[in-house]
Amino acid sequence: MAKNLVIVESPAKAKTIKKFLGTNYEVIASNGHVRDLPKSQMGVDIENDFEPKYITIRGKGDLLAELRKAVKKADKVYLATDPDREGEAISYHLSVALKLENKKYKRITFNEITKNAVKSSIKEARDIDMNLVDAQQARRVLDRMVGYTISPVLWDKIKRGLSAGRVQSVALKLICDREEEINSFIPEEYWSYDALLKPVSGLKPVAFHYAKDRLKKTELDEVKKAVKNKEFKVAEIKNTEKTKKPPVPFTTSTLQQEAGKKLNFSTSKTMRVAQQLYEGVDVKGHGTIALITYLRTDSIRVSDEADKAAKEYVEDKFGKEYVGDIKSVKTGKKIQDAHEAIRPTNIELTPASLKDKLSREQFRLYQLVYNRFLASRMAPAVYETKTVIVDANGYKFKSSSSKVAFEGFLSVYTPDDEKEENNRLSNINEGDILKLDSFDEKQHFTQPPAHYTESLLVKAMEELGIGRPSTYAPTITTIINRRYIVKENKNLYVTELGEAVNQTMETAFPAIVDTSFTANVETLLDNIETGDIGWKVIIRNFYPDLAESVANAHNELESIKIEDEVSEEVCDLCGRMMVVKYGPHGKFLACPGFPECKNTKPHYVKINVDCPKCGKDIVLKKTRKGRKYFGCIDNPECDFMSWAKPSKESCPECGSYMVEKGNKLLCSVETCGYTCENKKING
C-alpha cells in the first residue's frame, strides 16, 4: 500500500505525476477548491474583524470523504496544488478540511511537471506559506465585499441580476472610455505624394516618397508645382546595418496577446489549451507528458538548465553563430517573478515530432510557445538597409530597401511587424538621373484609436497594473457573459447595459473604477505576500469608505433609477399605451396590462431625423450582439444604417447627410472631409 499521498488539483495532473513517483505514492485530485465563501451571503463577518466564513463547496462532500480515507492510510501527505497564491490557498483549505494538523504534511511546488522537477520538489518540501495564503484571502475578501455590496445598488438602479466586480468594473471602464474617444474623434485630412522613378530602362518604376509624411493640400500643390518638369537626381545614398533583437519568452499576458493575433484564440481558449499542455497530454509513444511550464506568470526568467539545453540545441541544429548572448532584461515594471517564463519542458520535443499526436489547437499553441522560446535563445537578426535620396529642384524624395544579412532568430520566429521589401535600388548610384514615370498623390484621413480586442485589453490591463496573470481571461469572460460588452470580428464594443453599469460605477464609486487605485491594491497584495503588511490592515482601511459610498448611492442615486417609461406605441391587442422595459438584451416595449396582456414589441428610440434614403424615421437600434447603430425604421425595405448618429444638417459642399462627432458635425462621405461646429451642442 502507498505510504505517501500527493494531492493535486486536476485529474490530468494526477495522471501525469503518478507515473513519475512509483508505487509508494498515491496521487489524487481535489478538483480545484474544496472550501469557499458561501454564495448566499457575503461570507465576511464585518463585526468580527472581517473574519471570512468558509464552508465546504456544495458537491465536494463525497470527494472530501474519499480524500480523508486516503489521508488516514498515508504516513505522509504532500499538497501539490498550483505554484501560485491561489494554489497555496487551496492547499491551506485542504489542510483544514482534511484536518491535517495531526498528520505529517508538507507543501510542494514545481514550475514544470517533469520527473526531475516533481522529485526535486519532494526533496524541497516546505510548510504552507501563510503570507501567500493571506494575499489570496485578501483578494477574495475584497472582491466579495465589492461584489456583494455594490451589485444590489445596480439591481436597485438599473435591473436585477447585474454584478459589479473590483477588476471587471475597471476593465469595463477602459472599454467605455475607448468607445467615447472613438465616437468623438474628428478625422483630419492629409496627403501623401510619391514620385515613381525608373532607375534603368526596362525595370519597373520604384516609389520615392516625398520627405514629409503628412501634407496639407496647400503644401501638396506647392510641391507639385515646384517639381513639375524638373530633373530627379540621386543626391545621397546611405548604406546602414541594423540588428533586431530576439523576442523574450512568453508571459501569460504576451501569450494571450500573441495567440489572439496569430491563432485567433480568445483569452479563455488560450488558457484552456495551455492548461492542457501544462498538466499533461497523452502522447503516443511517450504516455502522458507535460509539454510546457506553468502558464500563469509575469516573469521572463528562464532556468539555467533550460537556457543551457536550448542553446546547445540551437548550436547543434543551426550553428554556433546562431546562439544568442542572453543578458538580463529590464521590464520597467514590478513583477512577482514567482515562476519562470512559459517555455517547453523539453526542447527536444519539437512541434513537428508531436504534430500527429496533439489536437490541432494543442499543436498550434505548443508550436507558438516552442518557437518563441527557441527564438529568445538565439542571436539577433541583421539587416542591410539602403536608402536613396533624390533631389528635384530642392525637394527631397526617398526610398529604402532592406535585406536580411543574417537570419538569426528569424529562422524560427517571425514577428508581426516583419515585412518583405522588394524595392529595386541595387542599380542606383549617387549622381544618377532617374526617369519620371508618374506621380501618385493620395488623400488620407487620420484614424481614431483602435477598438479594444481581447489582446489589446489584456495588454492595457497589464501596463496599468490591473489584475494579475490569472485574472485577465476570467475578467474578460465575465463582462462578456454579463452582456456589458460584445465581441464582433475580434473587436469589443460596449452595450447599452454596459454603459448604464459604467455610468453608475463612475458616479457612485469613482475609487473602484480608478485605474491607479486598482493598481495600488495589487501592490498592497504583493506586500502581503512578502509579509510586509497584514491582510486585515488593508480590509480595515478599505471597507469604511466602501460602506459609505454604498449608503450614499442608495440614498442619492434615486434619480437614475429607470422607471417604466410610457411610449407612444399603442398595444395592438388591448389598446393600452405600451411602456419601456429592460430585459437581458436591453430595452423592449411591453403592455402594462401584464399578465393579462403579454404583448411585446422591439423598442426603437426616434432621433427626429429623416432617413436620407426614404424619408422615414431614423431610430436607434442594436445588432444581435448588442452593439448600437442608427437605422431606418422601415428596415428591411430600407437598408440605411450608420454607426455614427446622423444629423438633420446636410453637407454644404456635397449635399450628403452629416453625422455627429463630439461637438462637431462631419460629412458622412469620408472623401469630402467637411466639418463644422455642431450648433445644437455649442449653442
Image (cartoon, grey):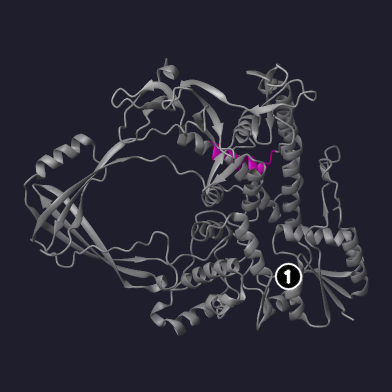
Looking at the picture, how far across and down is residue 289, in whole percent? 67, 76
Q: Does 454 sit left or right of 210 as displayed?
A: right
Q: Does 529 sit left or right of 344 as displayed?
A: right
Which quadrant of the figure has residue 323?
bottom left
Quadrant of the rendering where the N terminus is positioned: bottom right
Task: Name the dominant secondary structure of the magenta segment.
Answer: helix
Q: Nearer the viewer, residue 37 or 196?
A: 196
- Residue 537: in sight, yes or no? no
Q: Does 533 sit left or right of 95 as displayed?
A: left
| Residue furthest to the top | 683
Looking at the picture, how far across and down is residue 377, in whole percent? 47, 73
Q: Does 80 sit left or right of 409 as displayed?
A: right
Secondary structure state at the residue bearing disc 1: helix
Q: Which residues are magenta?
A: 164-176
Query: Mark 1 is on which residue type?
Result: Lys
Q: Nearer the viewer, residue 360 or 148?
A: 360
Q: Residue at x 60, y 33 (%)?
A: 496
Which quadrant of the figure has residue 663?
top left
- The answer to if 169 sits in the magenta stretch is yes
Note whether 547 is above or below 291 in the view shown. above
For mark 1, what is the residue? 13
Note whether 257 is above or below 540 in the view shown. below
For label 1, the crowd category at 10 Å Cα-Cα, with few meaning under 14, some 14 to 19 and many 20 or more, is many
Looking at the picture, how far across and down is residue 231, in whole percent? 6, 52
- The answer to if 272 sits in the magenta stretch is no
